[in-house]
Structure formats: C-alpha cells, structure tokens
Amino acid sequence: MDLLRRKKARKRSPLKQGLLRLPGQSLQEEINRTVDQWIEYVLIMTVLAIIAGMEWFRWFFKSPPHPLPFTAMAAIVWCYGIWKLVQTRKRLKILKQGRDGERYVGQCLEGLRENGYRVLHDIVGDGFNIDHVLIGPTGVYTVDTKTISKPTKGECKIVYDRESVSINGFTPNRDPIVGAKAQADWIKKKFLKEAIPRDLPVRPVVLYPGWFVVEPNGSEVWVLNPDRFFGYVKNGKLVLDKRDIQAIEGCLSVYVRNSELT
C-alpha cells in the first residue's frame, strides 16, 4: 500500500534552470512543426478516402447502411487509440526530461573546454549509446546522465554503496553501475589502445542532476551530482598531455563521423 502511494505521488523534474539553445534548434523546431502538419494532412486524406470508398461500395452494390458493426469497430479503435495516446504522452514526458538532462550536463561539460578538455556527445555503439565522453588532462570519462523525477515533498536522496544504487530507498530496474562499467570498458578497448601507446583507465561516471547523492570515497564508478563531478575532474591528477587528448578525440571523432554515414 505504501509503495502504491509512492507511485501515485506527484513528481517534478530535478532540473532547476532552463537550457541554452542548440545550434540549428530553430530549424529543428520548424522541421518538427512541418512534419506534424504533414502527418495531419495524411490522416485527413486517408480518412476522407476511406469514407469515399465506403460510399462508392454502397452505391455500387446497393447496400443499405450498417452502422452497428462500424460503430463497434470505431469504439474499439477509439479505446485503443486513447490508451495509446495516454501511454505515448507519458513516454514523451520521460523522453523529454531525459533529453533535457543530457543537454544540461552536456552544456556544463562544454564549459570545461577552457580548461583543456574535449567532449563528445551521444556516441552510439552496438545496441547502446554513451551520453558523453570527456577527455582532458585528468583522464577520460564516460558519463551516463540519469534524469530521474523527484517527489514534490519528502526526501530526495540517492545512495551508492560501491555495488548498487538506491533512489529514495528503491533500487532501479536497470543497474546503472553495470552499464557504466561496460561503457568505459568499450571506450578503452576500442579507442584508447589505438590512440595512445600506454595503458590508461577510463573512469565510468553516472550523474543524477538535481539530486543529493551519497557515495563512498575511492569507488571505481563515480555516482555523483554534476556539480561534484566537475570539482573532482578539475582537481584530479594530470595524466594526459595535449597530444594525447587530441589523439583520443581524433579516434572517437572519426568513429562518430563514419557511423553517421552508414
């Protein structure tokens, strides 16, 4: 019963401020509006064509109206359509919140360029994607952004114990630690060995914007609020020079560009 009440509790986005606009965002918004209009026209044309076809069928075969079966079919379609619309609205809300969280973290990461860092976003692998890869003087980091809704009241705390993450006492269905380690391992094996001659670890990072995160010191995977992460990065030990950074960024950039062409 307590779990049911928690699920029904009102949620809010963890992001506290608006986002900067992206390059070409106005054009993308215009593209989205144009596509929406195109879909509307296609739907109207399809419905009118179906109605016209039914009327021609009735005229040709001199068939009387049969409202009951069509009404039953319409009722079924409407019930299914309303259910799908509700589910789609929930899905869009989750997707938009996740997108905004990635944009927020991405914009913060871009601010590290003045400190000699390079950042690439949304690197797509085989069946997965890495939200951000940060390359700089203190090393290489794979960053997974988790934008989780917060309750409007009560505790808002994430606890990491080196093995698992709990969000207000609940364990997420997908273990973010396993995914973060796999992403870092993929970057290391696929790109670092090619870019630089020596062995260099890749730090897996999971960020929760807007949340208070409790985590142990010295853990392999960093589970943090973005503000603490940027402090960790800037104060880290220097392990890469400018040439190393350029080499790693070059390998990743070639992969991303080639992926976009396929």
Image (cartoon, grey):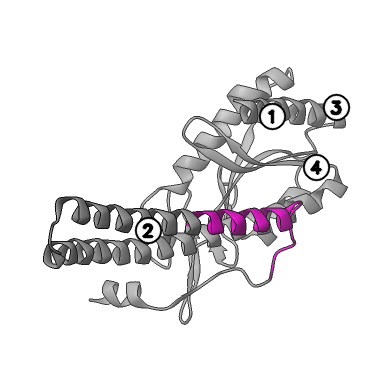
Residue that badge 2 annotates: 48
Residue assigned mark 3: 243
Disc number lying in front (4 or 2): 2
Q: Secondary structure at mark 2?
A: helix
- Kindly report the distance in space between the C-alpha atoms of the residues bearing marks 4 and 2: 57 Å
Q: Residues within 10 Å of mark 3 (few under 14, many from 20)?
A: few
- Front in this rendered view, residue 259 or 160: 259
Secondary structure category for the residue under label 3 = helix
Identify the element where label 4 is drawn.
Answer: loop
Magenta: main secondary structure equals helix
* Residue 233 visible within the image: yes
Pointer 1 with pointer 2, Cβ within 8 A: no
Q: Which residue is mark 1?
A: 257
Which amino acid type is marked by label 1? Arg
Q: Is 255 in front, or is 139?
A: 255
Disc 3 residue type (three-letter): Arg
Say if mark 3 contacts mark 2, CB within 8 Å. no
Is residue 215 something one can see in this rendering?
Answer: no
- Residue drawn at x 61%, y 56% is 34
Q: For the residue labelled by badge 1, is the local secondary structure a helix, a strand or a loop?
A: helix
Residue 65: % across, % down: 15, 64
Q: Which residue is mark 4?
A: 117
